[in-house]
Image: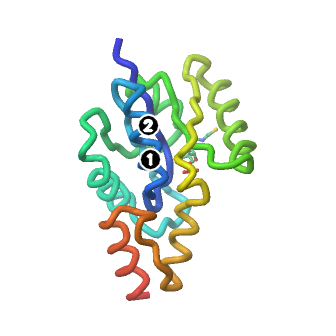
Amino acid sequence: MKRIAVYPGTFDPVTNGHLDLTERASRHFDEVVMAVLLNENKQPTFSTEERVAFMRDAVKAWPNVRVDSFGGLLVDYARKIGASVIVRGIRAVSDFEYELQMAMMNRRLIEEIETVFMVPSESYSYLSSKLVREVARFGGNISGLVPDSVEQALLKRFRSS
Ligand code: PNS
């Protein structure tokens, strides 16, 4: 049976830390589905379509990675696409509490879906979408932290605001 993992997130925007994890996950599962959250209430910097497009462009070199968006409960989405594993990244101990809560809740909702925590390369251990947005907003250098298309889009977004 095909082992499918779902890697969910807001990805506002995708960073090289996310992609480091995606590449690692792609080596351990038959298929990895990057699931971009449809933020119905929150106001992300980039629309769902933009976040999905950045992600598609960023993962195009990996044949067993595909991109989708989802709303509602993650476990329902995982079941719908036949994923048995949820991949989440842990950068530091501070990530762990929230991630553990989510993993426990998701397990309570659907017992069979396992959460697997993965650790990015240490060079990305401080990286987050939020920090990237903040640095870009104030004109700081974000090259090497996000894919080129994302860097250009952030520069454009904050130049015009
Ligand atoms: O990258 P993020 O923003 O930390 O990702 C959070 C995400 C998308 C994994 C989480 O918010 C989520 O799963 N949302 C879908 C709704 C849901 O299933 N909530 C219950 C989680 S226990």
Quadrant into which the C terminus falls = bottom left
Q: Is residue 129 left or right of residue 53?
A: right
The label shown at residue 141 is none
**Residues at marks 2 and 1, CA–CA distance in whole angstroms:** 6 Å
Q: Are marks 2 and 1 in contact (CB under 8 Å)?
A: yes
Pick whichever, 129 or 107, lies toward us: 129
Could you say where residue 127 lies in the image, as x and y percent from the top left? 56, 60
Q: Secondary structure at mark 2?
A: helix
Q: Amino acid at mark 2?
A: Arg
Q: Name the colouring of the figure.
A: rainbow
Q: Is residue 126 above or below residue 115?
A: below
Whereabouts is ligand 1, in terms of quadrant?
Answer: top right
Percent across and percent down for residue 158 are 43, 83
Q: Nearer the viewer, residue 80 or 138?
A: 138
Q: Residue at x 46, y 69 (%)?
A: 45
Residue at 28%, 50% in the rendered image: 56
Instruction: Say whether mark 1 is within 8 Å of ligand 1.
Output: no
Q: Is residue 31 above or below residue 35?
A: above
Name the residue carrying label 1.
20
- Disc 1 residue type? Asp
Q: Position of residue 3 (x, y in %)?
A: 39, 20
| Left or right position of 7 against 31 | right
Q: Quadrant of residue 135?
A: bottom right
Q: Is residue 134 above or below residue 84?
A: below
Q: Residues within 10 Å of mark 2 (few under 14, many from 20)?
A: some
Indicate left or right for 75 with 1 as reference: right
Task: Name the one closer to the observer, 120 or 38.
Answer: 120
State the residue position of label 2: 24
